[in-house]
Image: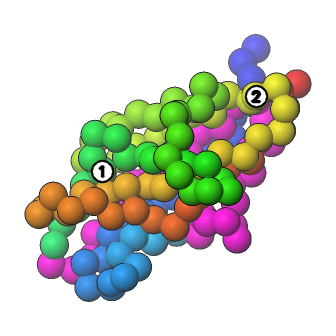
């Protein structure tokens, strides 16, 4: 029997007319609205939607992991696997760590002109594996 998986589907909207908040999430996913995964496996699906005159896409590395306190870049955690499925689709698979853990990252989009834009930080919390 396989472990149950908690799945979240999040729309990442790039709006070229909405500076400085060009990248938003539906449902909200930020420090005030963390994603909580209460199973040993969690899957977060990101789908890119567009508004405005300029297009964007997920770059080859659509997730920038950061330290939650300093917000400085860190190496990807062992408990998370990122897959960029297409220009408009990316997933992160989380496997429960040995202790309660919060993962902090930015979702990155790239504009037609090559500019990279990030979201507000996203927090995912997982309890220890059971």
Q: Which quarter of the picture shows residue 42?
A: top right
Which residue is rendered at x = 82% and y = 25% of the image?
Answer: 98
Residue 102, percent across and down?
72, 46
Can residue 45 be seen here? The reply is no
Which residue is rendered at x = 64% and y = 28% of the image?
Answer: 79
Q: Residue furthest right?
A: 130
Residue interval drawn in magenta? 27-53
Residue 25, percent across and down?
50, 68
SS label for mark 1: loop
SS label for mark 2: loop
Residue 122, percent across and down?
58, 58
Lower sequence index among marks 1 and 2? 1
Q: Does residue 59 lie above or below 107 as drawn?
A: above
Relative depth, front residue between 110 and 52: 110
Residue 57 located left or right of residue 71: left
- Tell me the distance, in whole angstroms, between the alpha carbons under discs 1 and 2: 27 Å
Residue 78 located left or right of residue 14: right
Can residue 79 be seen here? The reply is yes
Disc number placed over residue 129 in the picture, else none: none
Instruction: Indicate the quadrant containing the C terminus: top left, top right, bottom left or bottom right.
Output: top right
Residue 78 located left or right of residue 88: right
Residue 19, percent across and down?
33, 84
Q: Which residue is mark 2?
A: 97
Q: Is residue 87 magenta?
A: no
Q: Which quarter of the picture shows residue 48?
A: bottom left
Relative depth, front residue between 130 and 75: 75
Q: Does residue 53 lie above or below 104 as drawn?
A: below
Disc number placed over residue 58 in the picture, else none: 1
Q: Is residue 42 magenta?
A: yes
């Amino acid at each position: 029997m396989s472990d149950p998986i908690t799945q979240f589907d999040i729309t990442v909207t790039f709006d070229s007319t909405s500076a400085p908040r060009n990248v938003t999430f539906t449902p909200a996913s930020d420090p005030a609205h963390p994603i909580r995964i209460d199973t040993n496996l969690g899957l977060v699906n990101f789908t890119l939607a567009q508004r405005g005159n300029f297009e964007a896409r997920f770059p080859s590395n659509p997730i920038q992991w950061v330290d939650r306190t300093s917000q400085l870049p860190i190496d990807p955690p062992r408990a998370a696997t990122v897959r960029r499925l297409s220009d408009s689709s990316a997933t992160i698979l989380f496997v429960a760590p040995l202790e309660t853990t919060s993962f902090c990252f930015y979702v990155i989009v790239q504009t037609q002109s090559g500019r990279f834009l990030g979201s507000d930080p996203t927090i995912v919390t997982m309890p220890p594996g059971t």
